[in-house]
Amino acid sequence: MLCPCCGTSLVCGALKCICAARFVGEPLDETPIKVQRLGPAMTSVALMIIITGAALVATKWFAFGGVLVIWSAWRAVRLSKRDPEWYGGLRTARATLIVTIVGGLGLAGYGISYIPRAVENYRIRRVAATEAAMYHVANSLEEYKRIVGSYPKDAQEFKKAIGEGLPSDYWERSLKYQSNTGNIAERTESIENNGLPLTHFELRSAGPDGIIGTDDDIIMRDGIFFTNSELKRQTVVQQLR
């Protein structure tokens, strides 16, 4: 045994050292003291609180982090069973696991319920981007008509007059342009027979499927948007008149 003051070797049971240091008690046991850790269980609870707050405040996609919360709680239970001396609080860990399973499943359900809305929002953004490109073309066509007196006959004349070709839609496919302003006799006959003026110009995007003439087409006629089904109904009504 060594003196804690001067380091001199002492025999066991000595009461003092030659340096005058005195022992006031038995030496401390060198066996390590184990403090039970509740960190894994508390970490699970903290994760659930953080992920719930992030899903409600930032974005609902954080709700899928509930899987991480459940895994963390399950790990806490496993550690408590495997080494109870170091990782105490098995009951706490089990209770935390139950709470996080319920909360995690709730978060996952919350995230899954948002998927249809997210898909619809994504579709709306794609359509809106295409409609914005059509509005840009329509403004150019109106400016051309103000100067020349009529709309361009086709896409080639549009490019020659405007100085640029037709823009692409969201899916990187060129917009289709059609003009009926040149056929005055046909337009006059349409007004007399149907009471409706013939379309001056049409801009059309094939939509997500890339096929012209299907229901997902994005169509602008004279600055107004229509669906393909709406145009078909208008055609039927005009034929019945």
Image (tube, rainbow, N blue to C red):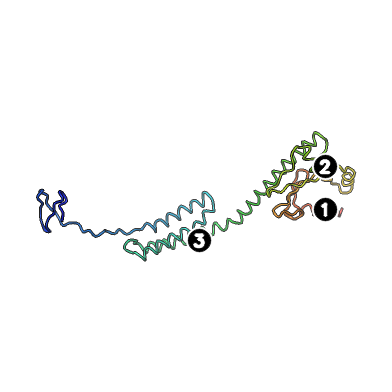
Q: In which quarter of the image is the N terminus?
A: bottom left
Label 2 Cα neighbours within 10 Å, binned few <14 / some 14-19 / many ≥20: some
Residue beneath label 2, please?
153
Residue type pointed to by label 1: Thr
Could you give the CA–CA distance between mark 2 and mark 1, rounded to whole angstroms? Answer: 23 Å
Please provide percent x and percent y for residue 27.
17, 56
Label 1 Cα neighbours within 10 Å, binned few <14 / some 14-19 / many ≥20: few
Residue beneath label 3, please?
105
Q: Which of marks 1 and 3 is nearer the N terminus?
A: 3
Q: In this view, does 165 lie above or below 113?
A: above
Q: In which quarter of the image is residue 98?
A: bottom left
Residue type pointed to by label 2: Lys
Mark carried by residue 235: 1
Q: Which residue lies furthest to the bottom in this view?
A: 81
Residue type pointed to by label 3: Leu
Please provide percent x and percent y for residue 96.
41, 61
Label 3 Cα neighbours within 10 Å, binned few <14 / some 14-19 / many ≥20: some
Could you give the CA–CA distance between mark 1 and mark 3, rounded to whole angstroms? Answer: 51 Å
Determine whether the residue tagged by mark 1 lies in a helix, strand or loop.
Answer: helix
